[in-house]
Amino acid sequence: MTDAQLVQLAKQTDRKPVEGEPNLVVGVHNGTKVIEEFHCSDLCPQNTVRIVHYDVASGPTCDAIGGVTKSILVPIAITVMPKAYCFPKVIADYWESSVQ
């Protein structure tokens, strides 16, 4: 994926999760998989949170690939909890950090 393709994906507000696939690999950017992830709890689909981020779960650290780590609030049951994600720099500003 190019930077422009990532920005285009990040700007989309009408994307919906694929049933049974809450985490989809949507491409590769600078050699790292990019995941589109959806989180929903009690009030689905109204309160669904969509996050596009690097897949660093089994690979290099976020810093090592030039990503930006941010903690984002995701719905869990009837509450929200912060979860750290590694974002490509070009789209990091599309997601507000929940922990300053």
Image (cartoon, grey):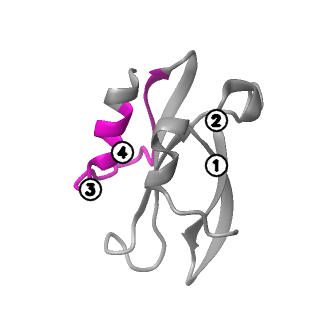
Marker disc for residue 13:
3
Pointer 2 or 3: first along the chain? 3
- Name the spot of residue 83 as percent of width and height, x first: 67, 60
**Circle 3: residue type:** Thr
Magenta part of the chain: 6-28
Pointer 2 or 1: first along the chain? 2
Q: Element under label 2? A: loop
Kindly indicate the quadrant of the structure image that contains residue 44. bottom left
Kindly indicate the quadrant of the structure image that contains residue 48. bottom left
Q: Judge depth for marks 2 and 3 and give the one in front.
A: 2
Residue of label 4: 10
Residue lying at 53% horizontally and 41% vertically, measured from the top left: 53
Marker disc for residue 85:
1
**Circle 1: residue type:** Tyr
Residue lying at 30% horizontally and 48% vertically, measured from the top left: 11
Q: Residues within 10 Å of mark 2 (few under 14, many from 20)?
A: many
Q: Is residue 11 left or right of residue 87?
A: left
Q: Nearer the viewer, residue 53 or 63?
A: 63
Spatial distance from mark 2 to mark 4, Cα to Cα? Answer: 15 Å
**Circle 4: residue type:** Ala
Q: Judge depth for marks 2 and 1 and give the one in front.
A: 2
Residue of label 2: 67
Q: Residues within 10 Å of mark 4 (few under 14, many from 20)?
A: many
- Name the spot of residue 95 as percent of width and height, x first: 49, 57
Spatial distance from mark 2 to mark 3, Cα to Cα? Answer: 22 Å
Vertical relation: 55 (above or below) 13: above
Spatial distance from mark 3 to mark 1, Cα to Cα? Answer: 19 Å
- Name the spot of residue 15 as percent of width and height, x first: 26, 50
Q: Element under label 1? A: strand
Spatial distance from mark 4 to mark 1, Cα to Cα? Answer: 15 Å
Pointer 4 or 1: first along the chain? 4
Spatial distance from mark 2 to mark 1, Cα to Cα? Answer: 9 Å
